[in-house]
Amino acid sequence: MSGGVVPVAASNVPISGLPELLAHLDVLVEDPATPFEAKLFDDVELQLTEASIPPLLPTLLPKLTSILKTTQQDPKILVSLILKLLTPVSFSQTLTLADESSLIAALSSPAPSANVLAMAILHKAASSASDAAQLASMPRVLEELIRTWLSSPDVQVGEKGNKLLGDLLEVDSEIPALQEVRHAVTVDGVAWSSGPVNGQNGSRRPTGSGQLWQRITNDSSIFNLLLSLAKGQDPSGATLTAHQTSLAQGRVLRVLPRLAALDFGRVARPLGGGDQGQSLLHFASISMVDKKDMLMHLTLIDYFEALVSLLRIRVDQGGVDNSFITLTLRRIIEEATTDDNVLKAALLGLPDRTVPEEADGLRAFVQDIVS
């Protein structure tokens, strides 16, 4: 490398090695099979700052996204640089640089790093209710997001998808957020709180428009895609392996308690485009999991414990139809525990495994909903 230096107009800070990287990118555009020269990418990325990035976007990003679409190599090093370049860019600005087809291509890529890149871009829409509403107008992107989240065998992609969906639907929710609880609530083995989301305290966030909720829970193609993948079938014709089906079900069970606490009515009421009139809550709680699978049964128990813990807080804090929550939860638990004494015992013993400050309130709630 010759160590060429290019001045950057916005900050007058030179970027060493930029000419060499640009030349390398031109070669990759012409011949995607050319091996990546990792040091060129790393040297430039390490020098980037929020001040130096904006003037570089028109030069670097089109080349990087073009290469990302055509390369058969692991694009991890491309993704790392793209993520750094997009750090100061808002969601709406990002869409002028990476259109819907680029997002769909990244989501559908077999490379987990490309999936994570697309999810990181979509996560920018969790910054405001208006950005979330803008994402709601992109159904093909949302379909591919649901497909990638549930069908990817990569653990990081699954975790990113859970966080992304939860944050997006929180900022889009028409119902006031849960207030911060004084004491820790343990959910899925970790202490839970309602926020902050993207640096914003959840209890003080403005309510959203509900457009994204409407798209995901009332759009029959998206909702049925979610249910189908959780049963191991992609409507496109592909079949998930037994292992991947378990991963998909686990991802649904981990995000659903949070969604139920955000907008119980959306997940608990039957949907016009749903699976035989089932709600998402009833499907996941009753008919999705094969309890003969020991690991999935344990995951289901963790899910019910998280669901009960968070909905108890939601009922206590009000702002919703508490009687509807209590009645629906009681019916679901009665059905779920009819032939499952292990689940019933776990729920009855849940107050004994929570922090002392929360135990009495949780015990009263459990006694009300578990017959």
Image (cartoon, rainbow, N blue to C red):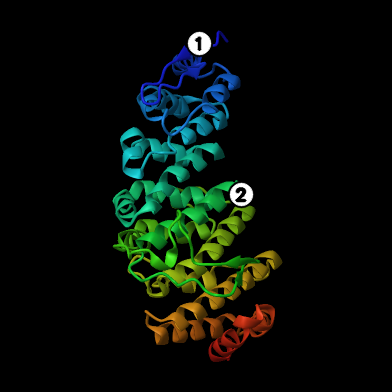
Q: Which of the two discs, 1 and 2, labels the residue nearer the N terminus?
A: 1
At which x and y percent is residue 217? 37, 64
Residue positioned 45% across, 37% down in the render? 106
- Residue 4 bears which disc, if any? 1
Query: Quarter of the image holding residue 57?
Result: top left
In this view, 210 is above or below 13:
below
Give the residue type at disc 2.
Answer: Val
Residue most extreme to the top = 2
Query: How many other residues sit within 10 Å of disc 1, few (<14), some (14-19) or many (≥20)?
Result: few
| Residue 26 horizontal side relative to residue 302, left or right | left
Circles 1 and 2: CB atoms closer than 8 Å: no
Residue positioned 40% across, 47% down in the render? 124
Q: Which part of the image, by quadrant, shows the C terminus?
A: bottom right
At which x and y percent is residue 336? 57, 80
Give the residue type at disc 1.
Answer: Gly
Of residue 104 and residue 185, the one placed in the foreground of this image is: 185
| Residue 235 horizontal side relative to residue 41, left or right | left
| Residue 367 horizontal side relative to residue 207, left or right | right
Q: Nearer the viewer, mark 1 or mark 2?
A: 1
Query: Quarter of the image holding residue 204?
Result: bottom left
At which x and y percent is residue 130? 29, 54
Element marked by disc 1:
loop
Residue positioned 53% across, 50% down in the render? 160
Residue denoted by label 2: 155
Of residue 138 and residue 25, the one placed in the foreground of this image is: 25
Residue positioned 57% across, 10% down in the render? 1
Decide if residue 223 is in sight here.
no
Distance between the alpha carbons at the discs numbered 1 and 2 = 40 Å
At which x and y percent is residue 48? 49, 28
Query: How many other residues sit within 10 Å of disc 2, few (<14), some (14-19) or many (≥20)?
Result: few
